Image (cartoon, rainbow, N blue to C red):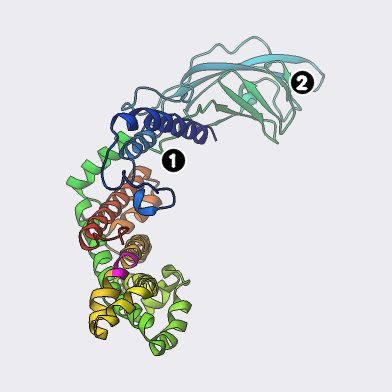
Amino acid sequence: MIVLGIYIAIFCAAFIVVRFGISKITERRDFTSLKTVTFGDESAVRPNRWASFLSVLTLFFLWGAFTGSAWVPFHAPGPFVGDTEFTYTMEAPDGARDDATVYARVLPTGEKGDPQDVPAGDGFAKNDSIALAAWRSDLVLMDKNDEITRKDGGKVVAIDGQPVSPGSRVEVAHGTVAVTSKGSLNFVPDGGMQMEPIWLPAPESVVARVKEISVRGYQNFTLWEHLYWSLFRVIVGFLCGAIVGIPLGYAMGLSGWFRGWFDPIVEFMRPVPPLALIPLVIIWAGIGESGKIILLFLAALWIMAISARAGVSGVAISKVHAAYSLGASRWQVLRYVIVPNSLPEIFTGARVAMGVCWGTVVAAELVAAEKGAGMMIMVASRFQLTDIVLMGIILIGVIGFSIDILMRKAEDWLVPWKGRT
């Protein structure tokens, strides 16, 4: 909730700065900006590059701030590291009480050290010392060196002067102490607001992994080989789905017979997630490359068919009538009216299909794959190598985003009339 609140605050501040400051200075005057009616006109909405830049920068700074990264100038409060102590009160069966102190040494993650050397004390409750790593806890068997133990009927009745009983928890300096059901003490040092590296590593750790795996490889293949095979599977599966799906969508949009014949099949398969088809594809095509490409083909097929059908259905009938009135044949209507006007819908479907294919290939590579980004992520997760998992996710997102940008550029080149007709 704290991170979300910070993110919302930065978003609002950035919006005010860009909207009423930078945008006024860098205001453009072109075809789109000169439109008199823009609200509700999708063609008049272009991404604000300053907003995109600040969005990525905000996510990076939040990531670094809450992981203790050396790449950002400020950090959220980190875990406690250093020496601390708390006092417990042991009560003997006869009601006598004695205090003893537990000295705790909290070490940075990954470091090892010895507990402090402390005097035992004069009473029947003796002092103790422990050493543990940040973000970890340690069970304190405080009576292992006491003259009166729990077996003798002794019990802890207070911690730092606060009354306790089995199951209770007390805040102490730099941490909390819980009394277990058996009467021992469990010390947990303050974790701060930063994420433990095993859950979310710092940016520099992820970059270091990229360099390491690029050179040394991971699971017998380099990073680029893993990404190449994932990209190859996605592109081949998507192209196969587009080659079949687009003509099928056109046929369904132009012929009542084709629509009646294929509509039940398309509408039945459309809501079925591609991941549900993995067992069936393995049975039919095995666990080799052909099975993965078939799965990606099925993931893209229905999306491309529906987008092509929607593109045909969205063509203004007035344009079709105008073409016929000028003597155009059916082929000419298809070539010069239907195809150009349906391309925007097809490109939108292609972008959606490409994203679905990326999600599907990662899942497909979880099943008996020797190489691929999904396989790399899966193996790393088994060993809790979160930096490799995060590295794979980021690279998949970067590649997917790059492909989406290329498809947008291709759409601008092939469909320059979009939003102007």
396 or 308: which is nearer to us?
308
* Residue 343 lies in the magenta stretch: yes
The total number of labels drawn is 2
Tell me the distance, in whole angstroms, between the alpha carbons under discs 2 and 1: 43 Å
**Is 240 placed above or below 365 here?**
below
The residue carrying pointer 1 sits among few (fewer than 14), some (14 to 19) or many (20 or more) residues within 10 Å by Cα, namely: few
Main secondary-structure element of the magenta-colored stretch: helix
Above or below 19: residue 119: above
Frontmost residue, 362 versus 411: 411
Mark 1 lies on residue? 199
Residue 43 is situated, as x and y percent measured from the top left of the image, at: 34, 53
Closer mark to the observer between disc 2 and disc 1:
1
Q: Amino acid at mark 1?
A: Trp
The answer to whether residue 313 of the structure is visible from this angle is yes
Q: Which residue is mark 2?
A: 92
Residue 146: in magenta span: no
Q: Out of 352 and 174, give the one closest to the viewer.
A: 352
Residue at screen point 63% across, 26% down: 177
Which percent across, then down, holds residue 251?
Answer: 34, 83
Left or right? Give the position of 221 relative to 186. left
| Residue in the picture at 58% in, 13% down | 120
Going by the image, does 305 lie left or right of 148? left
Measuring 17% from the left and 45% from the top, which residue is drawn there?
A: 215
- For residue 53, which quarter of the picture? top left
Magenta region: 341-345
